[in-house]
Each structure stands twice: as structure tokens, then as C-alpha cells.
Amino acid sequence: MKSIFFLILVPLFFNAQIHTDVERESKWLTDFDKALKLATKEEKNVMVYFTGSDWCPPCKKLKTDLFDSEAFNELSDDYILLYVDMPRNKDLLTPGQIQHNNTLFKKYNKKGVFPLIKIVNAKGNELDEYSGYSMNGEISYHLNLLNKYK
């Protein structure tokens, strides 16, 4: 009887965990125009995150330390989140998404730094940015930036 209960309970637990992860990930948009429209509608700024998801160690570590944190989860509701990935493996994105991200990269990441968090208003005007990550778990600078423009 216990084994039957376990077999029923475990899949439910994993399904709930997957659903939670999908909801959290769904906060991130990948279309700049949609992000600006939503920012206008909700009267919020846009947090643009430039990452190299498959090659940038500081980007990977920032995801764990900042974006998976409870502090970010609370602040993220004050922003429209835009994820701009610049992977080396071009199979990770559609050709249209690659072109879209390259356009944003040229306009908003002229120095070519990763990771980069840029805050823009609903009109697409740059307000502030914070680049890099030392991978030491210190995310207060990132959180201070987000607190400043919420």
C-alpha cells in the first residue's frame, strides 16, 4: 500500500515542481516590442538581461545567485523582464530570434559585455545599467539597481 501511495505522490510532486518552474520562466519575454507595450500598459520599466547562456560562466552563476533568489522574485513583479540571449550555439534560437537579439545587442549593449542588466523605460530610453558579475554570490549591486527603478 505504501508503495502505491509513493508511486502516485511522486509524479504529482514533480509535476507541481515543473509547473512552478514554467511559471517563473514565463515572466521573461523575448520580444522587445511586446515588452515595451506591456511596460506602457502596466506603467513599469523594462529590465533587459543580456546573457550568453551557453558560454558565459558569470551569466550562468548570476542566474543561480540572482534570478533564482527570493529577493529577485519579489522585485521582478515591478518590472517587465526581457531575456536577450546571445548563445554561441545558434541552434538554441530561431533565426528570427537571433536577428532580433542582434538588433537589441547593437543598440543596447554597445560595449559587448556579459552579463548586462539594462533598465529602459516604456519608450525604450535607457535609464541605467549594471554589467558583469564576480561570481562570489554578492548580488547587492544588482538588487540596488532594481530597487532604484521599481
Image (spheres, rainbow, N blue to C red):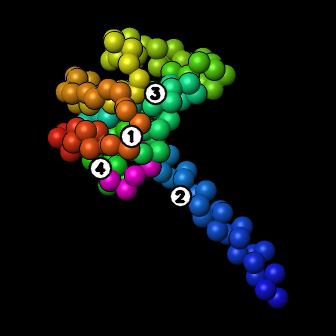
Residue placed most toward the observer, 55 or 36: 55
Q: Which residue is mark 3?
A: 51
Neighbour tally class for label 4: few under 14, some 14-19, many 20 plus, Cα within 10 Å: few
Neighbour tally class for label 1: few under 14, some 14-19, many 20 plus, Cα within 10 Å: few
Furthest residue to the bottom?
A: 1
Q: Is residue 42 visible?
A: no
Circle 1: residue type? Asn
Residue 114 on image: x %, y %: 41, 23
Is 64 within the magenta?
no
On the picture, is 61 further left or further right than 128?
Answer: right
Query: Which quadrant of the view contains residue 13?
Result: bottom right
Badge number at residue 136: 1
- The reply to whether dot 4 and dot 2 touch (C-beta < 8 Å) is no
Magenta-highlighted residues: 66-71
Distance of mark 3 from mark 1, alpha carbons?
A: 18 Å
Magenta: main secondary structure: helix
Q: Is residue 13 above or below residue 149?
A: below
Badge number at residue 20: 2
Residue 136 on image: x %, y %: 39, 40
Neighbour tally class for label 3: few under 14, some 14-19, many 20 plus, Cα within 10 Å: many
Callout 2 secondary element? helix
Circle 2: residue type? Thr
Which badge, 3 or 2, comes first in the chain's sequence?
A: 2
Callout 3 secondary element? strand
Q: Which residue is mark 4?
A: 75
Badge number at residue 2: none
- Residue at 78% of width from left, 74% of height from top? 7
Which badge, 2 or 1, comes first in the chain's sequence?
A: 2
